[in-house]
């Protein structure tokens, strides 16, 4: 998958006398996250003093012997490398510590999460990069989530970086993905507090399903967590996510409240999903004929006729017809629909 531009790069200083450790860590970071981290390595106290006098760093991973009587004011987030496994205590000078010997991918996530919290007032939510697709239906049970994920998988197959964002109160994420790790509730809390860097936090907690190439955020810890968000919070969340990927696919609940309407405004494309049921047909007809929101999205809306539905005359120009897949396995349905969405706008 190609790397994308316009991501915030972190100036990271590794200060340790353990050359093999610094070489391994810096090579891993440069190989895996060259678009995200600018790494500088230092192994001598005198050189460290010169570096800190000449440059500012976002994050420092610092070995205790090198930082005694050293001014660290030019490092926004100084972290002391703790030489033992397990939870690291707070350093004697009050600095936060980070276990030196642990899986690097987990270390990177912790660094990004801690860094996101010291960037108060630098929310990073004003740069939109991704194309945003909102997937919605006025009725539940029509396969909206499966359509959203199938479309996301199709874009990933086109070598796009894709982030799937589920904003249903009862999240469908555990049906398709691992539910281990920090949930989107951490982002909700930061939005409510109006401090910290949302983009950096998203980057630290997002997961990647390597089998289909989709990044995603785990569902909220509690049903009520999503209800703390205002429409402005939702806009900040969407814009922050859009700054971190090429394609952002948003899976919405079936309500049409102010938060949903705000997402419709931010979206480049809105997929309106329906199926052959009379309930879906009637509710979609009501939305198209009676709801003032429809006219706002008509120009960027596509009707997705799922499960072999025959839409008939459509009030929107673009109609995508998907087959009925007879399987109780949601992942099988998703994979089949992915092929059917090839070439979808």
Image (cartoon, helix red, strand yellow):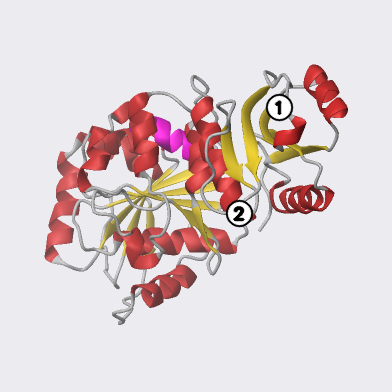
Q: Are marks 2 and 1 in contact (CB under 8 Å)?
A: no
Image location of residue 132, percent across then percent down? 46, 43
- Tell me if mark 2 has few (under 14), some (14-19) or many (20+) residues whose alpha carbon lies within 10 angstroms of its own: few
In the picture, the disc for residue 57 is 1
Residue at image x 27%, y 50%? Answer: 168
Reply above or below: 153 against 108.
below
Label 2, label 1: how many angstroms apart (C-alpha)? 21 Å
Read off the magenta span: 234-241
- Marked residue nearer the N-terminal end (2 or 1): 1
Q: Residue at x 83, y 29 (%)?
A: 45
Foreground residue among 65 and 223: 65
Which of the pair 134/120 is nearer the observer?
Answer: 120
Residue 244, visible in the rendered structure:
no
Tell whether 316 sits left or right of 132.
left
Q: Secondary structure at mark 2?
A: helix
Q: Mark number for residue 105?
A: 2
Seen in the image, is 154 located left or right of residue 145? right
Give the answer, above or below, for where 31 lies relative to 79: below
Residue 148 vertical placement versus 37 (above, below): below
Assess whether residue 264 is covered by the magenta stretch. Answer: no
Res. 211 visible in picture: yes
- From the image, give the main secondary structure of the stretch colored magenta: helix
């Amino acid at each position: 998958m190609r790397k994308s531009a316009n991501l915030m790069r972190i100036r990271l200083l590794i200060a340790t006398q353990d050359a093999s450790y610094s070489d391994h860590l810096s090579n891993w970071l440069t190989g895996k996250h060259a678009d995200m981290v600018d790494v500088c390595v230092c192994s001598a106290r005198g050189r460290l003093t010169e570096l800190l006098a000449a440059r500012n760093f976002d994050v420092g991973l610092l070995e205790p012997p090198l930082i005694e009587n050293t001014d660290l004011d030019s490092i926004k987030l100084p972290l002391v490398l703790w030489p033992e496994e397990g939870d690291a205590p707070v350093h004697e000078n009050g600095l936060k510590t980070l276990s030196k010997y642990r899986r690097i991918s987990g270390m990177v996530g912790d660094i990004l999460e801690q860094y996101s919290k010291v960037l108060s007032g630098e929310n990073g939510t004003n740069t939109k990069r991704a194309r945003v697709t909102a997937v919605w239906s006025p009725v539940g049970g029509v396969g909206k989530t499966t359509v959203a994920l199938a479309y996301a998988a199709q874009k990933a197959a086109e070598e796009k970086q894709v982030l799937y964002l589920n904003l249903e109160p009862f999240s469908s994420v555990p049906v398709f993905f691992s539910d281990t790790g920090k949930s989107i509730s951490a982002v909700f809390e930061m939005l409510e507090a109006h401090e910290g860097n949302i983009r950096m936090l998203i980057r630290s907690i997002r997961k990647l399903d390597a089998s289909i190439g989709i990044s995603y955020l785990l569902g909220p810890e509690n049903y009520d967590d999503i209800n703390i968000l205002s429409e402005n919070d939702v806009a900040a969340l969407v814009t922050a996510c859009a700054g971190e990927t090429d394609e952002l696919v948003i899976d919405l609940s079936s309500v049409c409240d102010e938060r949903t309407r705000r997402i419709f405004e931010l979206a480049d494309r809105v997929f309106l999903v329906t199926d052959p049921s009379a309930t879906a047909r009637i509710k979609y007809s009501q939305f198209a004929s009676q709801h003032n929101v429809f006219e706002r999205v008509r120009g960027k809306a596509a009707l997705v006729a799922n499960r072999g539905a025959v839409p008939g005359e459509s009030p929107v120009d673009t109609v995508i017809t998907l087959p009925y897949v007879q399987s109780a396995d949601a992942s099988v349905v998703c994979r089949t629909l992915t092929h059917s969405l090839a070439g979808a706008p």
